[in-house]
Image (spheres, rainbow, N blue to C red):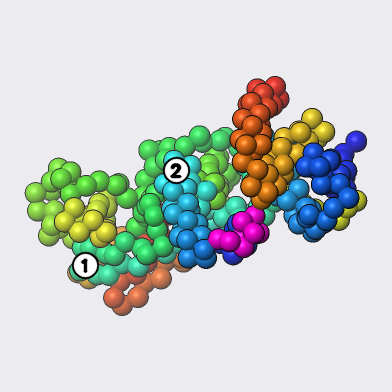
Amino acid sequence: MDKADFTSLAQSLGQSAGDADTLSAFFDEAVESLARLSDPPLVVCELFPYYYDTPEHDFPANAVVILALFFEGTHLDKTNVRHLLYYSLTWRDDTGNPEAWAFDEQSARKIRLYPYPSTTETFSRATQGEHTRVTQGGHTRIIH
Amino acid sequence: MAKTVDEINVILRDRLRATGTVAYTDAFMYDLISKAQLLVNAGLGRVKTTTTLTTVAYKLVYKIADDLTSAIDIISVKDGERTIYKLDDWRQLFQYNRDWFRATGTRIEAWAQIGRDLLILYPALTSGDSVTVYHTKLTDTLDDSTDELELPDEDIDLLLDVCEMVLHANLRQFDELKHLAERFKQDYVSQVASFG
C-alpha cells in the first residue's frame, strides 16, 4: 500500500472530507515513526557516495536512521566525536581506509568518516565489482 | 471449509444492519475483506508457504519486497535438506566478522533479517544457487464473490471484527467502534495465546 493508496482509503473512509495536505503530512510522520522502530519495516541498502579529502558527508536526504555503513565491505563502527579521541589524538587530520563513522556534533546532519579517505592513500581492500570508483571518490554502502 | 468473500460480505451486512441496501459497493467490500485478511495473517502468521529464492554470486543482501514478493515474515531458510542457522540479530555478523558484507564461502551458514525488508544470507557464494524460504504468506487479493479466504475458519471472527471496525469508523459510529476495538484486542491476544 503506497502513499496514494493510503490517502485514497483515508478519503474513502472520511467520505472525502479529509484535507489532502494534512493527510500527506500525517502519512509522512507515520512512516518516519515506523522507521525509528527497532525492527523497522522500511529498510534499504544503497550506494552512498564519498569524496576524497572530505571528512564529512551529507546525511542522505531519504534516510531516517542509519543502521550500518560499509566502506569497501568493512562494517564501520558507529561512534561519536568524543570517542574518536580514543582512536587518535589527531583524528581530525587522520586519513586512510575509514574504520568508523560518527555524526559531527557541531553539524548533526553530517556524517564524519574516521579516518577519511585521501587521494594519497592506497586502498587495500578487494572489491567485487559493485564498487564504482570515480575520480572524485567513490561509493560505499549504506543501510538505512 | 474455507469461507468465500460473499459469505463474509453477507455476515458483515447483517452485523451492520445493512441488508437490502447498497451502502457499500461490492468492490469496496472485497477490497476491505482482502486487506483485513492480509492484516490478520500478518499478525497471526496462519497462512504459510515456501518460495525458492535464486541466489546471486557475491550477493548476500536480498530485498524481501523484490525477491520474495509473497513473504511477510521469514520463518526458516533451507539449503536442500539443511536448515540454515538463524541469527536473531543481524548485528551479530559485525561481531563475528567486520568484513561480513563482502564475505564469500562454499555454503550459506546463517541468515538474518535487517528490519522487515532485507534478508541477509551469509556468506555470499561465488556462483548462483538457490535456497528454500519458508515464510508467512502475503495473502492473495480477493476480487470476486466466489474467491475463498485463505485464513482458517477459527480466525474469521477476527477478520470480521477488523472489517466491522473500519465500517463503523466510516459511519462515524465511534461508541460501537470503541467497544469492538476492546473486544478485538482481547480476542487477538486469546488467539495468539491459543495457537502461537
- Label 1 marks a residue whose chain is A
- Mark 2 is on which residue type? Leu
From the viewer's perspective, is A50 left or right of B159? left
> Which residue position holds label 1?
A54
Q: How many marks?
A: 2
Which class describes the residues within 10 Å of circle 1: few (<14), some (14-19), or many (20+)? Answer: some
Residue drawn at (85%, 53%) of the image: B21
Residue A133 relative to residue A19: left or right: left
Q: Which disc number belongs to residue A37?
A: 2
Disc 1 to disc 2, C-alpha distance: 32 Å
Res. A109 image quadrant: bottom left
Q: Is residue B192 visible?
A: no
Measuring 57% from the left and 55% from the top, which residue is drawn there?
Answer: B63
Q: Residue at x 41, y 71 (%)?
A: A132
Image quadrant of residue A135? bottom left
Under mark 1, the amino acid is: Thr
- Residue B68 lies, in percent from the top left, at 65, 52
Task: Between residue B155 and residue B167, name the one nearer to us.
Answer: B167
In this view, B139 is above or below A126: above
Q: Residue at x 32, y 50 (%)?
A: A76
Crowd band around label 2 with a 10 angstrom C-alpha radius: few (<14), some (14–19), many (20+): few
**Residue A121: x, y in percent?**
22, 65
Between B191 and B115, the residue placed more toward the observer is B191
Q: Which residues are magenta?
A: A11-18
Task: Establish if A70 lies above or below B49.
Answer: below
Mark toward the viewer: 1 or 2: 2
